[in-house]
Amino acid sequence: MAKNRGFSLIELIVVLVVLGLLAGVVGIKVTRWGVEGKIRTTKLQISQFKPALETFRLDVGRYPTSSEGLSALVENAGIEGWGGPYLDDNLPKDAWKRPYNYRFPGEHREYDIWSYGGDGAQGGEGENADITSWGE
């Protein structure tokens, strides 16, 4: 008599449990890489505002005011001496698609630039932590 060569129900359940555990571990790693990538991208963009702001200051004699904001780096709103645009592309948004916050004069440095992170609110930890131009 030929022996049945199929899988038993227990073998199938064991395989599905192992695959589920592997998918969970891989999913956590991929999610962590995505969050770390967003934080790195936001930090890099904040650092790239510095040369644009310095060039603006050389042309105009001052940094943009808080009311002019970072948009003064890409479009002239009647600012005397403006020689921009000072950024190659449109004004970037943070990795969560929100505009950066800007203040001049700054409370921490000459000017302050920050993102509120993933939750869009002040404070937080991990993905929700604020990302700033004045350090961590």
Image (cartoon, rainbow, N blue to C red):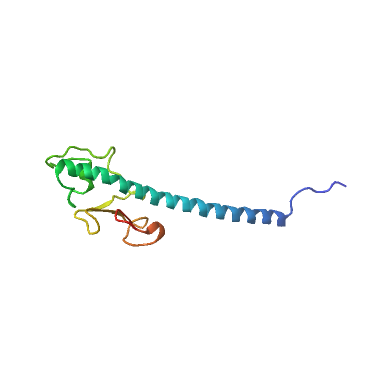
- In the picture, the quarter occupied by the C terminus is bottom left
* Residue beneath the point at 20% across and 38% down: 84
Judge left or right: residue 117 versus residue 55. right
| Total number of numbered discs in the rendering | 0
Q: Is residue 111 left or right of residue 39?
A: left
x, y percent for residue 33:
47, 50
Q: From what the image shows, is residue 118 above or below residue 51?
A: below
Please tell me in which quadrant of the rendered image residue 85 appears: top left
Relative image position of residue 15 (x, y in whole percent):
67, 53
Query: Could you tell me residue 108's position as x and y percent?
Result: 25, 58
| Pick the front one: 22 or 110 | 110
In the displayed structure, does residue 80 sit left or right of residue 131? left
Residue at 39%, 49% in the rendered image: 40
What residue appears at the point 43 percent right and 52 percent down from the top-left corner?
36
x%, y% of residue 126?
A: 41, 59
| Residue at 27 percent of width and 46 percent of height | 50
Pick the residue in front: 70 or 56: 56
In the picture as drawn, the residue positioned furthest to the right comes out as 1
